[in-house]
Image (cartoon, rainbow, N blue to C red):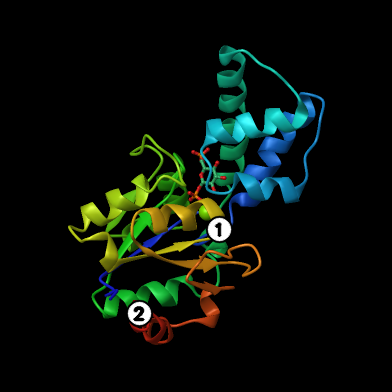
Amino acid sequence: MTTLKACLFDLDGVIVDTAIYHYKAWRRMANELGFDFTEHQNEQLKGVSRMESLELILGWGGVTLSDEEKNKWATQKNEWYLEYIHQMTPDEILPGVKDFLESLRKADIGIGLGSASKNARLILEQIGMVDSFDVIIDGTHITKSKPDPEVFLLGAKAFNLPPADCVVFEDAVAGIEAAHRGGMKAVGVGSAEVLTEADIVISSFTETSLSKLSDELLGWQ
Ligand code: B16
Ligand code: MG
């Protein structure tokens, strides 16, 4: 039986929507290399690390680069991405997120971040949410990216909880798989057609509440 002692939140696509900024920056790189890719292809980059994203994109363009050139483009992409991030404000926190975290806080349920991004802390600073999380695990702490469960297992460990007492909130297929491989239930945030493996899918935090989720959680075996 799952008990709910801590929630582990993905960042991009769950707390804020930075996927659009990743897309713009990667697309600029692709265009400079002489090709383009679609928003649909961009879905595959969600939750995937920077270097793995680069490999996928170069594959789409049929471009081969040396390791040195790959590092150069990854750094350049991140500089473009950071230009967008530095413009972010608390207005970009996704609807319902703050109220939902507040209800967890009142119920004494741990609140953790489990993001693949090396820029997670900067993003949280921009949107004024560093203090909203008891535990922050991001791309600077992990060696294996989602769908490996490392990021969420480190989160559970930081709370000193068994994985089964933690529930993950994720917008990426790779993140749902990571939660399950780590022995945690996963709430998909987004489209039920995309997040087919999630235990529950919500389209946004405005359509759920802790009591509603707990009812469904209690039914999870
Ligand atoms: P960075 P999440 C992930 O964040 C993004 O979804 C993914 O598109 C990105 O490539 C990855 O972070 C690495 O980001 O280049 O900033 O280190 O969804 O796990 O919060
Ligand atoms: Mg995400």
Q: Where does residue 26 sit, x and y in percent of width and height?
A: 67, 36
Mark 1 Cβ inside 8 Å of ligand 2: yes
Image point (56%, 25%), residue name: 75
Residue 141 placement (x, y as % from top left): 33, 39
Q: Which residue is mark 1?
A: 13
Residue count near mark 2 (Cα–Cα under 10 Å), binned few <14, some 14–19, many ≥20 = some
Which residue is nearer to you in this view: 193 or 93? 193
**Circle number at residue 103:** 2
Q: Which mark is residue 65?
A: none
Q: Position of residue 61 (x, y in %)?
A: 76, 29
Location of residue 127 in the rendering, given as x and y in whole percent from the top left corner:
47, 57
Q: Quadrant of residue 129?
A: bottom left
Looking at numbered disc 2 in the image, what kind of residue is underneath it?
A: Ser
The label nearer to you, 2 versus 1, is 1
Left/right placement of residue 9 relative to residue 198 reads left
Which class describes the residues within 10 Å of circle 1: few (<14), some (14-19), or many (20+)?
many
Q: Is 181 located above or below residue 35 in the figure?
A: below
Which residue: 51% across, 38% down? 49
